[in-house]
Amino acid sequence: MPKVGGSESTERSAQKYGPAAYSYFCPRWQPNASQAGVSPNPAVDTFTIKLPVFEGPFDLLLFFIERDELDIYNIPIARVTEDFLQYLHQMQAMNLDVASEFIVVAATLMRIKAKMLLPRKTYDEEGNEVDPRQELMERLIEYKRYKSVLEELRRLEEIRAVMAPRGYSSTELTQLAQKALADAEWESLSAYKLLRVFSRLMERFEERQKRKRVHTVYNYNYTIQGQREYVRSRLRPREQTAFEEIFFVLENRMHAIVTFLALLEMLNAQEVILVQGEGPNNFWLTLPDTPPLRLSEKDTA
């Protein structure tokens, strides 16, 4: 039979639930002025009773079991019911609102107590006698298991609260290196190099136009905004597009000039990124969120 009471259990439970609950750790607690948590008030001839705060009815039941070192697999239901109801009466005497879950558990305890007093036994489908305390015992064991896990999580939370995140050093260094590389490439570019590539494109375009030998009257309906939309449509997400590819399908010289001006505005607004590839006069256009790729020397202007 499990031992009831004991100074070691009393001290352990008092440390767990706090000094306000110390009077409950004496077996068969009875509130009076001589116990801890009860203090006389000289202003009025009454006593102030300090009750421990429990997170729920199962927390209170586990408290009684630990206080008296009871066997959770063989709960003395009459004794626990008496202590449980006594706690609720003290709460009502102090004009405290009793939560509905406490009332439900109190009714459950009284129902189990009544079943155990009846001489008629209950049997399951296999003919085994059913213990009225079985469901309560299983719920208490499950609650105790979750409570132990919660206490461990709280301990880990306290440890984590005093830590400062170090950050992902490798990822941050990679991002800084990529940004520095992009800035260095942009500084190495010059308007002269870009204009030289554009000039060569215009020469090729005029040569193709001369071969056609067609006299055309142009209606210049091109706008900077319209060509900005055209450039966006030619760029693919997370891919790099050759600078020359933007001008392959243009209709005439004026169309190419307006497109080039629109591209300069987009570069200035950082709507597109200009990347210099390997080899002379080899430029690529990308969207800002495109990761840098190693470029080959193909498509060299």
Image: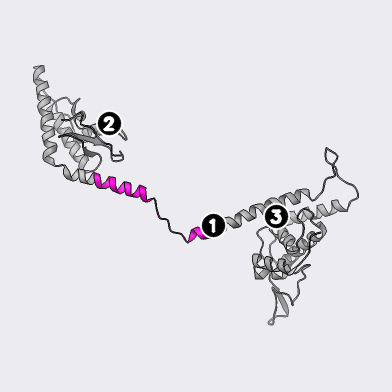
Mark 2 lies on residue? 233
Mark 3 lies on residue? 101
Dot 2 falls on a residue whose secondary structure is helix
Tell me the magenta residue range.
Answer: 157-181
Residue 39 on image: x %, y %: 70, 77
Question: Mark 3 or mark 1: which comes first in sequence?
Answer: 3
Which residue is drawn at the image coordinates 76% and 63% (left, top)? 68
How is this picture coloured?
one colour
Cα–Cα gap, marks 2 and 3: 64 Å
In this orientation, which residue lies closer to the viewer: 221 or 235?
A: 235
Badge 2 local density, few (<14 within 10 Å), some, or many (20+)?
few
In this orientation, which residue lies closer to the viewer: 179 or 233?
A: 179
Residue 114 on image: x %, y %: 85, 53
**Is residue 6 toward the left or the right of residue 228 in the image?**
right
Dot 1 falls on a residue whose secondary structure is helix
Q: Is residue 213 above or below residue 56?
A: above
Does the magenta portion include 167? yes
Q: What mark, if any, has residue 144 been given in the picture?
A: none
> Taken as a whole, is the magenta stretch helix, strand or loop?
helix
Please identify the quadrant where the N terminus is shown: bottom right
Question: Mark 2 or mark 3: which comes first in sequence?
Answer: 3
Mark 1 lies on residue? 156
Amino acid, disc 1: Leu
